[in-house]
Amino acid sequence: MASIVLSFVGSQDPYSKNHDEGSLVSLVKYLCEQQDSIKRILLLYTEGTQQNAIDTQDWLLSEVRTLTEDAIALLPVSHAFSHDPINQLLAVQEARLAIEQAQAYKIEQDTLVFNGSSGTPAMKACWSILQASGYAAESQVWQVRDPQKMQSGQARVFRNDVNVLKNEFDLKVIRQQVQDYNYSGALMTFNASSLLDETITALLRYGYYRISLDFNRAFSVLNAVSNSVNSQWMQDIALLRQKDSRALLKEGYFNALTRLKNQKYADFLVSLFGLQESTLKFLVTKKIGLSVSSKASEREQSWATLRQAEQGRLYQHLQRYILPRGGALRLDESISRYVLIAIVDYFPQFSPIAQPFKELNEYCDRRNEYVHEFIGISEIEDEARVLGNLRKIMKQVVGVSEENPFDRLNQEICNLLDRTLMQG
């Protein structure tokens, strides 16, 4: 590992008016005493400090035997900044350009070392600003005290990083991304921060794969840290990997709610269509126990089953059934969701959800027409009623809880983030 030192050159470099070592000289001398290998030094100077930069370079070459002339770069700042050296924005721009040059020499193990004590106040402050803004990963900001003003017990050279501020900024962004169920975005932000934690990384990846319905990958990433996470997550994903019908319906329901919360209305409607049909199939085949299928290849066998059910009374009910928009059911085609709704409507024990199914189906039909006509969807009409009907159905069919598992996951991730920040 080696250090790449970046510094503005001030009027008191390489020596102060009191003939004390300047801050840049003191910092380099300190780093060398700590057995720190200095790979390169970049010195930024104005038109007024050009000679100071040359003198500083001469001192470094004479005092630091490991440095060669090629390892020290003298970088003139822009004409505009030379004539306005207290301009904070210009100072940041010049420092950022120097960081970009330093990155060309930096390998993964190297550290960017910033001298925060040379130059004008704007020059000194820009390094901390860039560090806190995330422009300089794996960087250190160092301060050098004036020896004439040092207090007892104070070190002359000390680190003054503001990474904790950057971590707080990153944490705020990550928390919002997590609350929006944007696990992939949160993972990218987290990996770019210094808040590294294996468990948090695994949970973010788990959330992304789970909400994408990729249950096998969700299991794999979580299995690696199974001892450090809530066992509930492993239990959930185990049922989903086994294609448990109830678990899949619950997952579809909560997945749809996350899309609605993020105002992804078209995606929510797609989920709603599929969830409605899947719930009807589950109800008819699992709870009522009728062996019917919507597959065309199994059409005749399905109708034969329906003709025999309930001593023929169910089929008679289907024959008399009138659709909400008028007309009869088509009893010579594959089993449609209209037929499934009519079957549910026949059984008294399902009367509490028969009407919610009808209203939900009518809503889906109406919105489906908009989709096919390429009409944008910027809101969900009668959202409260749609959600109320869906909740009634899901509660009776599979018994969903009020708490979204993705919200519980988000809370666990945020708690771990807070803990990591405190530890860091």
Image (cartoon, rainbow, N blue to C red):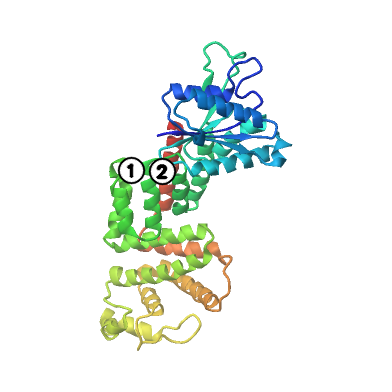
x and y percentages locating residue 409 in the rendered image: 40, 48
Is 195 left, or right, of 6 in this rendering?
left
Name which residue type carries label 1.
Answer: Val
x and y percentages locating residue 361 in the rendered image: 46, 73
Q: Is residue 26 above or below residue 353?
A: above
Q: Which mark is residue 317?
A: none
Quadrant in which residue 195 is drawn: top left
Residue ID for mark 2 = 412
x and y percentages locating residue 63 in the rendered image: 50, 22
**Between disc 1 and disc 2, whose residue precedes?**
1
Is 11 left, or right, of 319 in this rendering?
right
Q: What crowding class fits label 1: few (fewer than 14 Cα within 10 Å), some (14-19), or many (20 or more)?
A: some
Q: CA distance from mark 1 to mark 2?
A: 9 Å
Q: What crowding class fits label 2: few (fewer than 14 Cα within 10 Å), some (14-19), or many (20 or more)?
A: some
Residue ID for mark 1 = 229
Which residue occupies 44% across, 71% down? 273
Is 403 left, or right, of 291 in this rendering?
right
Report whether residue 60 is seen.
yes
Q: Is residue 172 above or below residue 358?
A: above
Element under label 2?
A: helix
Give yes or no for contact between labels 1 and 2 (Cβ–Cβ under 8 Å): yes
Report whether residue 119 is seen.
no
Quadrant in which residue 300 is drawn: bottom left
